[in-house]
Amino acid sequence: MNAKFLSMFHVLTAVGILGATPFGVAQTPPPGGHDVHDAHPAPPANDVPPKAEDFLSLSADGKKVRIILISAFNGVNYGMNFNGFAKGQAKFVLPVGADVEVAFTNRSPVPHSVVVVERPQVKRLQMGEPAFTGATTPNAVRGTTGTKGESFTFKASEAGDFAFACGFPSHAANGHWITLEVSDKATLPSLQLGTGPVFTPAAK
Ligand SMILES: [Cu+2]
């Protein structure tokens, strides 16, 4: 091996090592114990924890309840969630007679929707007619995608156990619903996310 060849060999080896370094880093498992080979589809990227005050507010005169529902807020229940909760694990309470405005968006390319139904209805494949007049997105069976959003208003005219359910066939039965209680004891609306504190908004 002559000196010239040996020198070139060293250069190539050095380049090879440098070239290999970033590749080696890329193959290092990501932090936090995530398994990139998980069998489930990747959830929508969203590490921001849901906050109750982002989803429930009162108008300045305190008469209109504003609710924000976001489907596929994160990867919980394969995206079949509202505001990051499924299977009834978030709970809105409304006083009887509340005038409610719901703004709905969907972060997933999979269609979702919202219908207010009586609680037992969530076990069915089809949600059917809303429990209160107008308490549904425009075409709940077809659903919608994207962040343009849909909204609707309704009056919570009767006390009882209800749900905000997805009207896309089979979604509610697979957990795409959260709890809605219309109460003749409550004087203010509230929202509890999971086992978190009960949030009651101030009029603004
Ligand atoms: Cu859905």
Image (cartoon, rainbow, N blue to C red):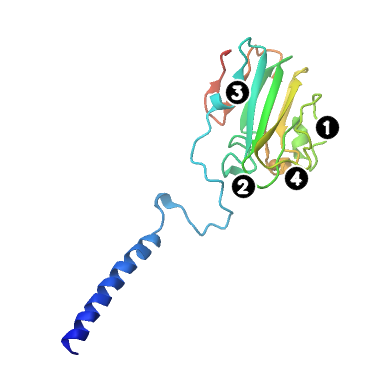
Q: Secondary structure at mark 3?
A: strand
Q: Is mark 1 within 8 Å of ligand 1?
A: no
Residue 56 in view here: yes
Q: Which mark is residue 56?
A: 3
Q: Is mark 4 within 8 Å of ligand 1?
A: no
- In this rendering, the answer to whether 153 lies above or below 202 is below
Quickly name the residue at label 2.
Answer: 78
* Viewer-proximal residue among 94 and 149: 149
Residue lying at 74% horizontally and 23% vertically, measured from the top left:
153
Please identify the quadrant where the N terminus is shown.
bottom left
Q: Where is residue 87 shown, x and y percent of the image?
A: 65, 37
Circles 2 and 1: CB atoms closer than 8 Å: no
Quickly name the residue at label 4.
Answer: 170
Q: Secondary structure at mark 2?
A: helix
Q: Where is residue 58 shown, x and y percent of the image?
A: 61, 16
Identify the image quadrant of residue 155. Answer: top right
Q: Is residue 94 left or right of residue 26?
A: right
Give amino acid for label 2: Tyr
